[in-house]
Amino acid sequence: MKIAVAREIDPSEPRVAASPDTVKKFKALGVDIAIEPGAGIKSGLPDSEFTAAGASVSADALRDADIIIKVKRPEPSELASYKRGALVIAIMDPYGNEAALQAMAEAGIAAFAMELMPRITRAQVMDVLSSQANLAGYRAVIEAAEAFGRAFPMMMTAAGTIPAAKVFVMGVGVAGLQAIATARRLGAVVTATDVRPAVKEQVESLGAKFLAVEDEEFKQAETAGGYAKEMSKEYQAKQAALTAEHIKKQDIIITTALIPGRPAPRLVTAEMVRSMKPGSVLVDLAVERGGNVEGASPGEVADVGGIKIVGFTNVAGRVAASASSLYARNLFSFIETLIDKTTKSLAVKWDDELVKSTALTRDGAVIHPNFQPKT
C-alpha cells in the first residue's frame, strides 16, 4: 500500500500534509510513503528530513498511490495524475464549489474533506479546524501587534507610563480563545463577545471580560454540534448597538466569526471602524468568506483614515511549520482508521461515522448528502 504526499501548487500555500514524525508512524504501519520533491520546503522541511524518516522522494510520487494527502483541494490540472479509485484527503472547502466536487467525482477519486470531521470524542485528534484555528488565533494577535505600533503591556518608566492596549475579540471559538490567551500573555486588557452563552465562562477563565446582550435568544444560541446559530435581525441590532459603543474605546479588534457553509456575518460596519482612534488595528480572520469587517480586503492591509484593517488569508499558513506539524497528525490519526493493521491494506468502513461525514465523492459520483447536485 502506498501513500503519496503532494506538493501544493498554490504559491500562497506554504503548508505540507506530512511531517517526518508522521512518516515514521506510517512506516510503522507497514505503509510505503512517497513525497513530491520540495513539498515541505516552505514549512522548513527539506527532502532530506523526509528521507531520513523513511520516505522516498520522487517526481513520480503520486503515480499508483492508494492514498494522496494534500493541504488544499486538488486543482483540475492535478487530478489527471491520480489513479482512479485513489483516496484523496485534504481541506476541500466544498461549500459553494460544486464544479470542483464534480470534477473530482469525474476523475474517479474518493475525496475526503478533513474540515467536515464530526465533533465527537474519538475524532478530536483529527479535528483540523481546531488545530489550524488555534494557530490562526495566535497569529492574529501577532499580526495585530506588528501593525499596532505601540506596546501591548502597561509599562511604567521614569519617562512616563504607557497604558495597556485594549483588545476586543469578536467570536470565541478555538481561534478566539487562543487570541484572548495570546493577547493576555502580551499584557493587553482583553474583552470578548460571542452569541453562544457557553463560552462566557471560558472567556472569564482566561482573564478577559465577556460582553453580550444576555437575553432569552442569547441563551438558545448554540447548535447541538457546538456551532453558533445565526441570530435574528432584532438580536443582531441590539448586539451591534452594544458593541458599537465598546468598539470606540478599543485599540485592537480581532474577528473570528464563521458559520459553516454561510458567508461570514458582518460584525463591524464602516461606521464602527471610523469611530475608532487613529492607529487602531482590526484583524479579520473571516476575510476569505466575505469578512466580518466592512472594508477588509483579502490578502491586504487596508488603511481607513489611519486605522488598519488586516485581511490576510490563510493565517494558519503564516505559522507554516507548526500548522503543518499539527495538520499532519490530524491526517495520520484519520488514515490510521482506514488501514487494516493485519493485512496492511486499505480497509475503508464506508458506514463509519468518520467516513460518512467526510467522504465527498466515490465511484464517479458526489455522495455527501450536503453537496448532492441539484436536480
Image (cartoon, rainbow, N blue to C red):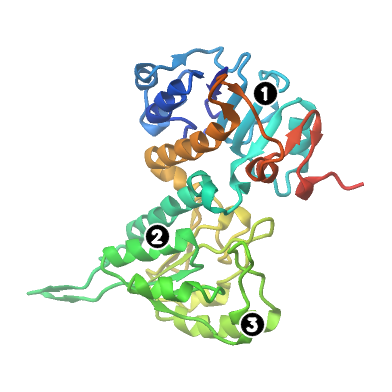
Q: Nearer the viewer, mark 2 or mark 3?
A: 3
- Mark pair 3, 1: CA separation: 46 Å
Which element carries disc 2, helix, strand or loop? helix
Do labels 2 and 1 touch, CB within 8 Å?
no
The image shows residue 37 at horizontal and vertical percentages of 47, 18
Identity of the residue furthest to the right in this view: 375
Do labels 3 and 1 touch, CB within 8 Å?
no
Which element carries disc 1, helix, strand or loop? loop
Res. 178 mark? 2
Looking at the rendered structure, the kind of residue marked 2 is Gln
- 134 in relation to 341, above or below: below
Residue 319 falls in which quadrant of the image? Answer: top left
Number of marks drawn: 3
Label 1 sits on residue? 86
Mark 3 nearby-residue class (10 Å; few <14, some 14–19, many ≥20) = some
Left/right placement of residue 76 relative to residue 22 reads right
Label 3 sits on residue? 217
Q: Residue at x 26, y 74 (%)?
A: 164
The image shows residue 154 at horizontal and vertical percentages of 21, 73
Identity of the residue furthest to the left in this view: 158
Residue 158 falls in which quadrant of the image? Answer: bottom left
Looking at the rendered structure, the kind of residue marked 3 is Glu
Q: Nearer the viewer, mark 2 or mark 1?
A: 1
Screen quadrant of the N terminus: top right
Q: Residue at x 53, y 76 (%)?
A: 197
- 178 in relation to 220, above or below: above
Which element carries disc 3, helix, strand or loop? helix
Looking at the rendered structure, the kind of residue marked 1 is Ala
